[in-house]
Amino acid sequence: MSLPALDGTALDGAALDGPAFTHDGPGTAEASWLAWPGLRDLPAAGASSVTHLLLVAAHPDDETLGAGGLLATAAAAGARVDVVVATDGEGSHPASTTHTGAELAGVRADEVERAVHLLAPQAALHLLHLGDGALTEHVDALTAHLRTLVGPGSLVVAPWAGDRHPDHEAAAHAAAGAVEGSGARLWNYPVWAWHWARPGGPEVPWTSAVRLDLAPDVLQGKLTALAEHTSQVAPLSPAAGDEVLLPASVLAHFTRGFEVFLTDGPAGRDSLDAAFFEEFYAGNGDDPWGFEDRWYEQRKRDLTLAVLPRRRFRRGLEVGCSAGVATVGLAERCEELLALDASPSALALAAERLRGSGSRVELREGVVPRDWPAGTFDLVVMAEVAYYCGPEDLQQLAAAAVAALAPDGVLVACHWRHLVEGYPSTGDEVHRVLRAQPGVQVLAHHEEEDFLLDVLVPAPAVSVARAEGLTP
């Protein structure tokens, strides 16, 4: 690995979205990744049938960090293996006073040869000696070399273009160009993304990700191979400029018992339209989500009602009321309640459920954020709905919800945390976006493996006990 670019510049010269990062910055802790259930939900990688693995690395050690387990697994299964390392990684320690770039190139070439031999003794290793930090200028050369190796049935595995390192992006573009029209498959592996991305965040296309669980002997082999990259996992020397490039906090992302690859599957970034919900309700009976039958759903509704900081509300809004199961309980807490849903079939079920209740509930068809209702509300509830929005709509929905709150308003959000194929956002990202809205603070937060429940109020947040004078 070499130092990432710090100027946020993409291959095409456009600015990258998201925060700048440094290799020794705080980053996202591995414990945060392992606590996110989405990683456990990823479908299994279909690697057992690989007959030819073409593994592409921008720098020596990328191949071991991002795909060392896959490399060992494919080799053990008898696959033909080519490992292409585009640069010598001579730029990993630009401030070193003890090693020149040429000396580092030699050190790192020896390291990658040992590491690859440990993982795949029969692999053909191709060291191309292209410029570290300047791979953007050599995409055509890398593409041409890869085309000599790729063929029908090959699995090409390369760095991810969104990794926020220009060399990784260049390697990804070269691999994509080599695969085009070849009949080969293309997977990409994140490296720096584990450091700067956020669990469940929209920066990574999780709906196209797969997970390769590593057998114990494969994981041990990967750890042994990682240790061969001494120039990266340990200081070059005690001198200034020779500090370790991959500290323990970064290495932790690559010593876990699985690897993650991004395939060419569905990106799933656009908001789901009204037709999706209408088709779902029209063909799945009166309770397609199991709201009435599942204790999980009943308990979650009870928690949502219990967390409301006031006994009564003047005007409430339920976004995504579905068939009205939760609407019944919310209506009992509101003088007036407006319940929105995108599906006419769902609204018809809700109307039947509410018939004769005497509650002042208006059921209205609408797609948010486009059809956000006018006026203010002292209660807004969004339960299991906002992850249907793509990133842009999610931001607009969160802003609309906060803007609609009365001065004493309460915004309650509750969302499933597991990955669902085809959903454009995740529950974790929904709540991160909501909590980041200006002018609101968290009054209550409940977190479980399966769902998040947040109560947001206009700042300053005042606890129920303080509001009732029980505490100063």
Image: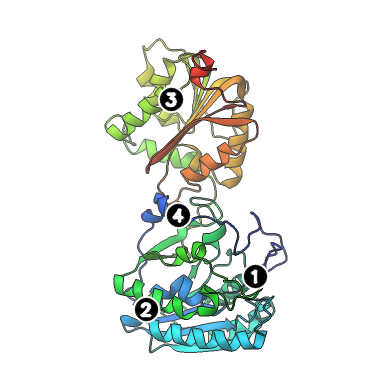
**Whole-percent x, y for residue 6 in the image:** 68, 64
Where is mark 3, residue-wise?
307
Where is mark 1, residue-wise?
166
- Of the 4 image quadrants, the one containing the N terminus is bottom right
Where is mark 4, residue-wise?
33
Q: Which amino acid type is shown beneath numbered disc 4?
A: Trp
The Cα–Cα distance between marks 3 and 2, rounded to whole angstroms, is 50 Å
Mark 2 residue crowding within 10 angstroms, few (<14) / some (14–19) / many (20+): many
**Lower sequence index among marks 2 and 1:** 2
**Lower sequence index among marks 2 and 4:** 4
Q: Residue at x 58, y 75 (%)?
A: 171
The answer to which of 354 and 83 lies nearer the viewer is 83
The Cα–Cα distance between marks 2 and 1, rounded to whole angstroms, is 27 Å
Q: Which amino acid type is shown beneath numbered disc 1?
A: Pro
Viewed as shown, does residue 316 lie left or right of 406?
Answer: left
**Lower sequence index among marks 3 and 4:** 4
Where is mark 2, residue-wise?
72
SS label for mark 2: helix
Name above or below for residue 362 compared with residue 64: above
Q: Is residue 185 visible?
A: no
